Image: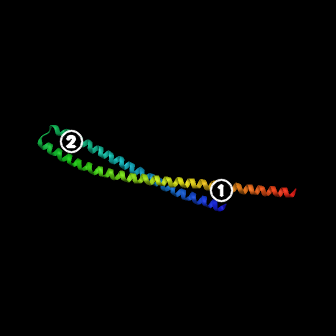
Amino acid sequence: MSELKKKIDRIRRIHSLETSQLNVLIGELARLDAMLASQQKRLDEFETLKRQGLEINQVCSVESLTQTNLWIDSIDRSIKIVREALSKCESERAEARSRVMDQRTRVRGLEILMDQRRLEFDADAMTQQMLLADENALKKYARN
């Protein structure tokens, strides 16, 4: 019975470590979500600036149009950089999400294993109590 108790304690310690690791991974996923939202906001801002620049183009002098086109080219380069960062962030988020799901599965498996061991422990304890009760009943019967 003490071996079963040791196994339960060991599983409980491992479960605690795995749960801590899960919390770390969830924090990492939240950080990536925030980064993704930030990159998306930057992209939206650049695209808004580009649209505004294109609207200005309609009624301007040649020199102003040239400056505006250079500015729009610069914004296009910035948009490309942000899109690449966004893509990288999305792939990192997908990997982090996969790790979180794997870790959740591991933690849930440990919970199931711990529940099974507790049931075994309880069944073993009940068996011991029943054997002790039977032994006491036999002793009582033998005395009579």
Residue nearest the observer in this picture, 143 or 30: 143
The picture places residue 4, in percent across and down from the top left corner, at 63, 60
- Closer-to-camera residue (49/103): 103
Residue 96 at x, y percent in the picture: 41, 53
Q: Residue furthest bottom?
A: 3
Q: Is residue 15 left or right of residue 3?
A: left
Q: CA distance from mark 2 to mark 1?
A: 73 Å
The image's mark for residue 121 is: 1
Query: Is residue 115 in sight in this rendering?
Result: yes
Q: Residue at x 82, y 58 (%)?
A: 139
Split into 4 quadrants, where in the image is the N terminus? bottom right
Residue 78 placement (x, y as % from top left): 25, 49
Please tell me which of labels 2 and 1 falls first in the chain. Answer: 2
Which corner quadrant holds the C terminus? Answer: bottom right
Kindly identify the residue that appears in the image at 20 percent across and 41 percent down: 54
Say which amino acid is labelled 1: Phe
Residue 19 makes an appearance in the image: no
Query: Mark 2 or 1, which is nearer the eye?
Result: 1
Is 31 situated left or right of 109 in this image?
left
Q: Position of residue 41 (x, y in %)?
A: 32, 45
Residue placed most toward the observer, 136 or 13 = 136
> Tag 1, which secondary structure?
helix
Q: State the mark number for residue 53.
A: 2
Q: Secondary structure at mark 2?
A: helix
Q: Residues within 10 Å of mark 1 (few under 14, many from 20)?
A: some
Q: Residue at x 34, y 47 (%)?
A: 38
Q: Residue at x 33, y 46 (%)?
A: 40
- Compared across the picture, whether 62 is left or right of 21 comes to left
